[in-house]
Image (cartoon, helix red, strand yellow):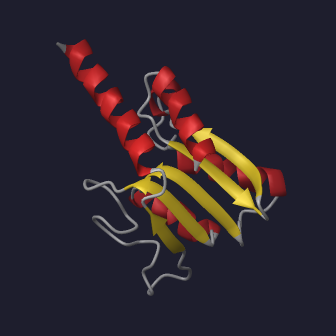
Amino acid sequence: MLEAIKEAKKAYNKNEVPVGCVIVYNGKILSKAHNLNITLNDPTAHAEILAIKKASKKINNYRLNDCELYVTLEPCPMCAGAIVNARIKKVFYAIEDPKAGSCKSVLNIVNNNKLNHQAEIYGGICKKEAKNLLKRFFERLRNQRG
């Protein structure tokens, strides 16, 4: 999760919502990414989507069986859907998202037994660091807007 927080800091430094993601396979980092929605002018450029794309390209397979995804904020519906479609085995997140969280908070897409795949979910890892980073980002944003 510490690597995902490093990625979130990169997003923060680019004035992006500070979310970072890392995908691990057999204990080794397969890919890393951070939010780039504003930079790329792309609403799908969430950290999880970018990390899934990089990992799939690296192993030349759209299925990421037995991979673990570490992310600083609970995945949204789009990212949760991508996690299911990629068949990621485990998802670890730092903080819950009470507005769009789709692993527990608002929806539970990744563990919906009507879908073809479910992921194991673990929340609250490095919660303090991720929460402080998001808090600082939104305080800075409010101050910039006056």
Of 48 and 21, the residue lying toward us: 21
Residue at image x 71%, y 67%?
63
Q: Is 89 on the left or on the right of 140, as rendered?
A: right
Q: How many marks?
A: 0
- Is 61 situated above or below 142? below
* Vertical relation: 56 (above or below) 83: above
Identify the residue at image location x=37%, y=72%.
108
Query: Observer-nearest residue: 139 or 14?
Result: 139
Residue 134, given in percent of the width and then of the height, sits at: 36, 36
Q: Nearer the viewer, residue 124 or 143?
A: 124
Q: Position of residue 96 (x, y in %)?
A: 35, 57
- Report the residue that reaches farthest toward the bottom: 113
Residue 142 lies in quadrant: top left
Residue lying at the far left of the rendered structure: 146
Above or below: residue 31 compared with residue 138: below
In the rendered image, the vertical position of residue 48 relative to residue 109, given as above or below: above
Quarter holding residue 56: bottom right
**What residue appears at the point 48 percent right and 50 percent down from the top-left corner?**
126
Spot occupied by residue 78 in the image (x, y as percentages of width and height): 44, 57
Q: Could you tell me residue 44's position as x and y percent?
A: 48, 44
Which residue corresponds to the image point at 52% horizontal and 51% vertical from the top-left? 71
Looking at the rendered image, the quarter that the C terminus falls into is: top left
